[in-house]
Image: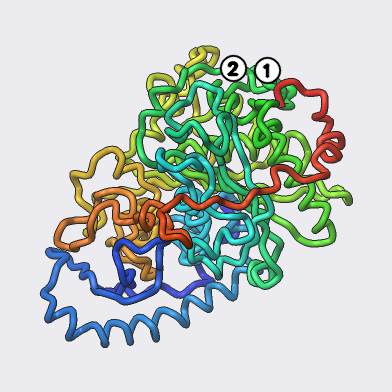
Amino acid sequence: MAMAGPSLSNMFFPFPKTRQLTFPLPRSKFQTPLTRTQNSIKLATRENSSSSTVRDQEQEEATSRHTHNHNYKPKLEEHLNRLPEAWRQIQGEDDWAGLLEPMDPLMRMEMIRYGEMAQACYDAFDFDPFSKYCGSCRFTPHNFFSSLEMPRVGYTVTRYLYATANINLPNFFKHSRWSKMWSKHANWAGYVAVSDDAMTSRLGRRDIVIAWRGTVTCLEWVADLMDFLKPISSNGISCPDETVKVESGFVDLYTDKEESCGYCKFSAREQVLTEVKRLLEIHSEEEVSITITGHSLGSALAILSAYDIVETGVNVMRDSRGVAVTVMSFSGPRVGNVRFKERLERLGVKVLRVVNVHDVVPKVPGVLFNENLPAAVMKVAEGLPWSYSHVGVELALDHMKSPFLNPNGDAVCAHNLEALLHLLDGYHGKGERFVLASGRDPALVNKGCDFLKDHHMIPPNWRQDANKGMMRSNDGRWIQPERPNLDLHPQDMHHHLTQLGLTNSSHA
C-alpha cells in the first residue's frame, strides 16, 4: 500500500447516529422490476432489540421522517458537492488512505453506487430456464436503467458484453430448456456505460463504467475452478513477464470465443477493449476515468479486464495522458499469483475489494497457499500452480454486526451482493456501532435470498417477474413475447481491433 496521502476526513461532517430510521419499501412485495422509493415502514435498530410494535412505528414515523429528511439530506448534498475535487482520492489515487477507517461518507456512497451498477447485472439477467431468452439480458441497452427503475443513475449503456459458454464453468452459464433459444453458445456477461453530461458535471470527470455479471443463485461454480495457474500471456494477453499467472478458468472465460455465434464471435476481451477505445476517442478532450465493477466471478473478470486495459495501453489518450483505471470489487475470488499482484501494482491499477468475512468465495482459489502465509513460505511456494495472492486494498465487513440479518444465514446469504451493500451502508469503522447511513432499504437484502430476521416480515426471494414473463396477446392467448433484435457488435469493431493489434490473435 502507498504511503498515506491527504485525507478527506476533515472535509466531511459526521452522520448523526440515530437509533431509528425510516426505509422505503415497494407497494407490492412481488412487483418487478424493483421499486426503490415508495411506501415506507420503519425498522428499528436498538442495542438490545431490533423490533418495535406497529403502534410505536406509526406514532414515531412522522418524526423519524422529518429528522431524516432535514438532518441527513443537507449533509448528503455537502458531500456530493465535494466530489468533483475529491474523485481522484475516491478512485484510489492514495490507496484509499484515511477513507475507510473511519468510513468516509462520500466513499461509502460511491462504493454503494458502483455496487448497485454491478447488482443491475443480476436484476436484468434472465435466469428462467423456461424462457427461450434464458441467459440473455431482459432489456435493451437504451432502456436498461429505466427498466430497472434506476432512471437517475446518470449513465447510458453503450454496449452489451457476451461470453461463450464453451468453457468449463457450467454454473456461470444459464440455458433455456427449449430447443428454440436465442443462442446456443452465448450468455450475457455485462455492459459498458458512460456518464451523461449532467452526471459528468457532478462527478468532475467523464466516467466509463464496465460492469461484469457474476454468480448469485449458487456457489457451485467454485467447484468448477480448475485451481490451476497459467501464464496470462498464454491466452494472447500482453505481458512481458511469463511468471505472471492467473487462474485458467477466469482467463479462458475472458478470452474464449465461438466464431459460429453472432454474439460471441468476438471474445469478451475484444468486446471490452474496443468499446473502451471507442469511448476514449469520443471523449479525448475531457477528463476521463475508467471504473470496473463486478461481484463474485464478475469481480475476477473486472480485475482481469482492468489489467488488460492498462497493460495493452488502451487507457492512454492521444495526447499521452493515462486514464485512471479503478476496480470496485465485491465478494471476489483470488485471480492470480503474487507476480500478477506485483504487475498490477506496477501498472498503477487500483483495486478496492469489499468482502464479507464469512463468505467462502474470497477465500478461494489458493486455500493452502495465499497471501496470509509468511513471506518466506510464499517465496518458496510462488512457483506452484495453486499459489495465489489477493490484489489491492481490502475492506472486510461482518454480517454478524448487522441487527437486521440472521446470524445463521447460509453460504449463499453470506455471498449476496445486496447484503454486502447493506453492510456497507451501516459500516462506520472498526469498533463503531452498525447504523444505516443513507436510508437504503434493508428489504433489498431479501430480494434474492433469505437473510433478514423473521420479525421484519420481509419474504425471502421476493423479487419475481410478473407472470414469469408471459403476456396476453390480442387474441387472448398467453405467450412469451418476442424481444427486440439487438445490434450484436459495432460496425467499427474491426477498425478498433486493427488499431489494437488484435486482428490476428487466435486467443483474444
Residue 139 position within the rendered picture, expressed as x and y whole percent measured from the top left: 55, 54
- Tell which of 52 and 449 is nearer to you: 449
Q: Secondary structure at mark 2?
A: strand
**Mark 1 and 2 residues: CB-CB less than 8 Å, in contact?**
yes
Residue drawn at point x = 46 percent, y = 28 percent: 371
Q: Which residue is mark 2?
A: 230
The image position of residue 240, as x and y in percent, is 74, 23
Quadrant of image for the C terminus: top right
Residue positioned 83% across, 44% down in the render: 492
Q: Amino acid at mark 2?
A: Lys
Name the image quarter holding the N terminus.
top right
Estimate how packed mark 1 is, as few (under 14), some (14 to 19) or many (20 or more) residues with alpha carbons within 10 Å.
some
Q: Is residue 119 visible?
A: yes
User: Which kind of residue does numbered mark 1 sit on?
Assistant: Ser
Residue on which the image places disc 1: 234
Q: Secondary structure at mark 1?
A: helix
Q: Mark 1 and mark 2: span between their CA atoms?
A: 7 Å
Residue sitting at the far right: 319
User: With respect to residue 164, does 211 lie above or below?
Assistant: below
Residue 154 in picture, x, y percent from top left: 61, 67
